Amino acid sequence: MYRINEGSIDLPRAWQDRTINVVSSNPAGPGVSLTITRDDMPWGMGFAEYVEDQAKQAAQALKDFRIDARRELSVNGVPAIEIECHWVAKQGPIHQLITTVSASGGRVLVLTASTGGEMSAAQQAEMRRIVSTLQLETVGA
């Protein structure tokens, strides 16, 4: 059974979740948004290597992309890496906290907190608090 906020649907067991969830602190306009994406690490690639590869891809794809900080952490006992970065979109500067979490079965969850301009220290602290509440479920549970 596959669960979504609105209910559930009976999908074949082999199907994989490729959804993108986007939630925002201010639905009426600019604010901080949190995007949750899912990915599979390529066969034979380690978790840290995967995160580095994703950062290189972002540097190639995003205008003026720069990493300001990188830290290894644990999200409820699960290995994770946070990258704080800035880049320039069509609408202006973007500030992001990208937390990649190693999930079971070679999968990863990427939680990206974004805001136009600069994220305040209080906003960063709140986004880190929110990310720290992630509770992963066992595959097949």
Image (cartoon, grey):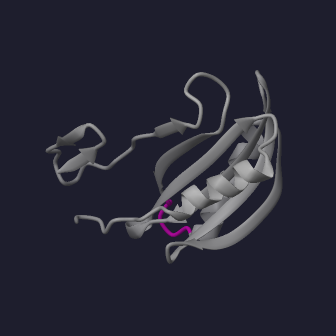
Residue 81 magenta: no
Quarter location, residue 92 = top right
| Residue, far bottom | 77
Residue 44 magenta: yes
Query: In the image, what residue occupies the spot 55% across and 27% down?
Result: 27
Is 13 placed left or right of 46 in the picture? Answer: left
Is 125 placed left or right of 5 in the picture? Answer: right
Quarter location, residue 24 = top right
* Quarter of the rendering occupied by the C terminus: bottom left
Number of marks present in the image shown: 0
Q: Could you tell me residue 11's position as x and y percent?
A: 17, 45
Query: In the image, what residue occupies the spot 73% across and 68% down?
Result: 71
**Where are the magenta residues, as a range?**
41-45
Query: In the image, what residue occupies the spot 64% across and 60% down?
Result: 51
The answer to whether residue 56 is visible is no
Q: Could you tell me residue 59's position as x and y percent?
A: 77, 45
Q: Could you tell me residue 121's position as x and y percent?
A: 79, 53
The answer to whether residue 73 is visible is yes
Q: Could you tell me residue 61's position as x and y percent?
A: 72, 37
Foreground pick, 114 / 102: 114
Foreground pick, 136 / 132: 132
Is 33 placed left or right of 88 in the picture? Answer: left
Is 44 placed left or right of 72 in the picture? Answer: left
Query: In the image, what residue occupies the spot 39% across and 65% down?
Result: 136
Most common SS among magenta residues: loop
